[in-house]
Amino acid sequence: MAEEKKKSSYISGRESLKITRFNRKVTKKLEEERANAIKDPKLYTTKMKDENNVVEFDNVCTYFFTDVGTVKSVDGVNFSIPKHATVGVVGESGCGKSVTSLSLMQLLARPSGQVVGGQIRLNQGDGTALDIAKTPNSVLEKIRGAKISMIFQEPMTALNPVFKIGQQVDEVLQIHNPEMSPEDVKAHTLHMLELVGIANKEGVYEMYPHELSGGMRQRICIAIALACSPSLIIADEPTTALDVTIQAQILELLQSLKDKMNASIMLITHDLGVVAGMADYVVVMYSGRIVEKGTADDIFHHPAHPYTIGLMKSKPVVGKKVDKLYNIPGSVPNPVDMPNYCYFRDRCEMQCDKCKGQYPPEFKISDTHVVSCYRYFEEGEQLGYPQSVDVSKLI
Ligand SMILES: Nc1ncnc2c1ncn2[C@@H]1O[C@H](COP(=O)(O)OP(=O)(O)OP(=O)(O)O)[C@@H](O)[C@H]1O
Ligand code: SF4
Ligand SMILES: [Mg+2]
């Protein structure tokens, strides 16, 4: 009986109390550290490793301190978003894609959600960078919507149902450009509506979100996101709520506007087709870690990690007839109790002797292609291990 309880996610009253006390202590300490950083800009100002990047994720760890234990949603994630590039972030549901982007926007559900390790650097364009997780809200408010903006999955919930479209686009322009006159704001809003392909711009300016179709609503969200010409657009599953023909139009629009504005895109999706058509670089995530990253050509034509290979096999191909599509066996590990070996091992059909050891380090298998898998132990140049944070040392 005791053994069964141990195997299940059963938590005794005493354990639950211990977790709650720990969570309270650790989140209080992290919030205090953050409040102290606000007083000294030196504590949140840093430098980019490479000035050609807009954003650098450097061993980022974002954990949620929940009632059932610590969920390591993002655990030692390392990748960069170069200027003017589109970076696709793919992986199955729950692998940490959205939490990675929310960590960058600092829109995590605090205090339970915290960036506990690593650095997220945002290029300021003046030789300095912001260490986002330590940056105070008063500074972040000027950045969100202006330098980095986000397009969410569901346009109906992203737009406010009680305000007219015009007011909602005007608002973002007014907040970030207080010197603009109301006439200039309206003119710019109408220009944005035209840019995102709204034919009846004057009419739509006066409409409410429920009067528009799903595709039009997503165009409005894009207009809001791009109104202040951001240097980075985060698109979190921007087309999942739309039908296939509208999906293609929205993606084309996003790509053309990105080129016009010289911006970068972080494109989050579990649709490999979407990434193939748009991304310059691809990052593949699994259970909060990056298992493979490279150029779109590396990932689509030379997938190296068994998980990426499985994802490719499970994608239908036009013109190729198969009796049954491949599916990756098994399911992801329990996020509050991750194994100390390769997270994919229990589902992996290609495992070898080395896989019995600790979590694999990253191996560089070409100048652009990096994979976290022991199959490349002989041929790849070994880079570092993902850096996890021991939460007991945080207090
Ligand atoms: N507020 C929260 N509290 C506790 N755990 C959370 C919270 N938000 C996310 N998580 C956990 O973090 C993990 C990663 O979630 P995330 O939303 O990033 O997944 P995702 O890759 O975006 O999935 P999807 O494709 O379904 O959107 C999941 O295990 C999720 O349960
Ligand atoms: S390290 Fe081993 S178990 Fe993990 S993905 Fe690679 S081959 Fe499979
Ligand atoms: Mg998500």
Image: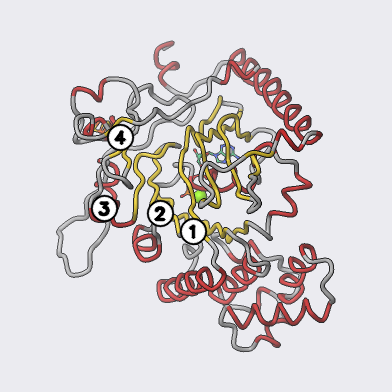
Q: Is residue 32 left or right of residue 370?
A: right
Label 1 – label 4 distance at C-alpha:
29 Å
User: Which of these two is toward me, 131 or 109?
Assistant: 131
Q: Of circles 2 and 4, which is in front?
A: 4
Query: Residue 287 at x, y = what percent?
Result: 42, 37
Q: Which residue is mark 3?
A: 312
Q: Are marks 2 and 1 in contact (CB under 8 Å)?
A: yes
Residue behind label 1 places its C-beta within 8 angstroms of ligand 3: yes
Label 3 – label 4 distance at C-alpha:
21 Å
For label 3, the SS is helix
Mark toward the start of the polypeptide (3 vs 2): 2
Query: Residue 272 at x, y = what percent?
Result: 35, 58
Q: Of circles 1 and 4, which is in front?
A: 4
Q: Which residue is mark 4?
A: 363
Q: Are marks 1 and 4 in contact (CB under 8 Å)?
A: no
The numbered mark at residue 47 is: none
Q: Is residue 317 above or below residue 310?
A: below
Question: Could you tell me which quadrant the N terminus lies in?
Answer: top left
The numbered mark at residue 270 is: 2
Residue behind label 2 places its C-beta within 8 angstroms of ligand 1: yes
Mark toward the start of the polypeptide (3 vs 4): 3
Mark toward the start of the polypeptide (2 vs 1): 1
Q: Which residue is mark 1?
A: 237
Label 3 – label 2 distance at C-alpha:
12 Å
Residue type, mark 1 in image:
Glu
Mark toward the start of the polypeptide (2 vs 4): 2
Residue type, mark 3 in image:
Met
